[in-house]
Image (cartoon, rainbow, N blue to C red):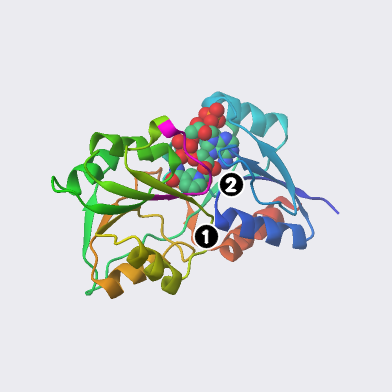
C-alpha cells in the first residue's frame, strides 16, 4: 500500500493528538517536528525530529529532500515566525499546507479582560501601584516584566527560567497543564493574586485560570495573538486527519 509522507510542525496538544491519529491510521508515514524548546517533550507514537530547519529555505529543502507530500502547521498560535516560514516554504516546495489551530478564548459578560498587543503593553497595563501578578506567558516572554520590578510575580512555565530573565520578586512554578479551575482558584487565593497576565492561547488545557479569575472577580490582561498567514485552517486533530485522508485519496497514495 502506498503511503502519504507527512510533516507535522508540532509543539502543541493538537499536534500530539494528530500524531496519535496518524499512528492509528494506515497509509501515512508521518514525522512530528519539535523546535526543541522544552527539555522533556512528550513521547510520541510517530517519528520525531528536533530543531529548527534553518529558515524558509532550510524548510523548503527538508520538504523536497524528504519527499514530504503534505505539511501540517500545528504550532502554537504565538509561534508566528514558524507559521510564516511554513507558508513560504510550502509555496516554494509546492507542498500542500494545512494549519491546525485552536480558536482563541473569547471573554464572556462576567469576565474582566483587557486585550493588549504584546508583552511590553501587558507589563504597562499592570499599572504603577504594586500588585501580585500571576504570569503565564511562556519562558521566552518573562524578561519583559523586569521593566516593572515593583510587582510580586508568581510565574508558571513548563521548564525552569534563567534567573537573569526573572523580575526581582518572582516565585516560579514549573508545571505542564492541564490545570483544573478548582486548583487554579486555590493557587490564586493561596498567593493573594490581584491580576493575571496570559497569552490568548485558546484551548481547554490552560483555560482553568480564566474560570478561576471569573469566580474571584479578578482582572485578566490578555495578550492577543500575532498575525499568521491566511492558509487553509481547521480546528481539531480529527479535521486535520480528514484533510490528510482526502489529500491521500487525490494523490492515490
Ligand atoms: P517561532 O518564534 O515561531 O519560531 C522560531 C524558530 O524556531 C523558527 O523559525 C524555527 O527555526 C524554529 N521552530 C519553531 N517551531 C518549530 C518546529 N515545530 N519544528 C522545528 N523548528 C521549529 O516559535 P516559538 O514561539 O519559538 O515556538 C517554538 C515551539 O514551541 C513551536 O513548536 C510552538 O508550537 C511551541 N510553543 C510555543 C509557544 C509560544 O507561545 N510561542 C507556546 C507553546 C508551545 P528555523 O527558522 O531554524 O526553522
Q: Quadrant of residue 138?
A: top left
Number of the label disc, if any, that sits on residue 177: 1
Looking at this view, name the residue that lies furthest to the left.
Answer: 128
**Crowd rating for badge 2 (residues with CA inside 10 Å; few <14, some 14–19, many 20+):** many
Residue highlighted by disc 2: 10
Which region shows up in magenta? Answer: 155-163
Query: Helix or strand or loop: what does disc 1 sit on?
Result: loop
Q: Is mark 2 within 8 Å of ligand 1?
A: yes
Q: Residues within 10 Å of mark 1 (few under 14, many from 20)?
A: few
Q: Residue at x 49, y 63 (%)?
A: 205
Q: Is residue 219 left or right of residue 253?
A: left
Q: Nearer the viewer, residue 205 or 17?
A: 205
**Mark 1 or 2, nearer chain start:** 2
Disc 2, SS: loop
Residue situated in front as seen by the camera: 89 or 148: 148
From this view, report whether residue 42 is shown above or below residue 185: above
Q: Is residue 238 visible?
A: yes
Amino acid at each position: 500500500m502506498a503511503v502519504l509522507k507527512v510533516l507535522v510542525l508540532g509543539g502543541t496538544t493538537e499536534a500530539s493528538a494528530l500524531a496519535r491519529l496518524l499512528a492509528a491510521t494506515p497509509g501515512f508515514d508521518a514525522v512530528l517536528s519539535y523546535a526543541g524548546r522544552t527539555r522533556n517533550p512528550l513521547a510520541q507514537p510517530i517519528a520525531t525530529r528536533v530543531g529548527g530547519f534553518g529558515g524558509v529555505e532550510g524548510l523548503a529543502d527538508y520538504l523536497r529532500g524528504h519527499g514530504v507530500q503534505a505539511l501540517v502547521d500545528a504550532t502554537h498560535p504565538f509561534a508566528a515566525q514558524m507559521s510564516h516560514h511554513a507558508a513560504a516554504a510550502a509555496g516554494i516546495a509546492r507542498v500542500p499546507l494545512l494549519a491546525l489551530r485552536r480558536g482563541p478564548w473569547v471573554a464572556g459578560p462576567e469576565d474582566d479582560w483587557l486585550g493588549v498587543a504584546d508583552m511590553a503593553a501587558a507589563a504597562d497595563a499592570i499599572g504603577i501601584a504594586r500588585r501580585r501578578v500571576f504570569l503565564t506567558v511562556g519562558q521566552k516572554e518573562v524578561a519583559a516584566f523586569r521593566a516593572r520590578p515593583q510587582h510580586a510575580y508568581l510565574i508558571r512555565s513548563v521548564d525552569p527560567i534563567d534567573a537573569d530573565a526573572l523580575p526581582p520578586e518572582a516565585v516560579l512554578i514549573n508545571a505542564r497543564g492541564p490545570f483544573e479551575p478548582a486548583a487554579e482558584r486555590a493557587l490564586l487565593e493561596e498567593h493573594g493574586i490581584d491580576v493575571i497576565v496570559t497569552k490568548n492561547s485558546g484551548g481547554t488545557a490552560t483555560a482553568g485560570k480564566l474560570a478561576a479569575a471569573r469566580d474571584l472577580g479578578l482582572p485578566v490582561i490578555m495578550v492577543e495573538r500575532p498575525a499568521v498567514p491566511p492558509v487553509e485552517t481547521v480546528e481539531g486533530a480529527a479535521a486535520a486527519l480528514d484533510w490528510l485522508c482526502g489529500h491521500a485519496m487525490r494523490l492515490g497514495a
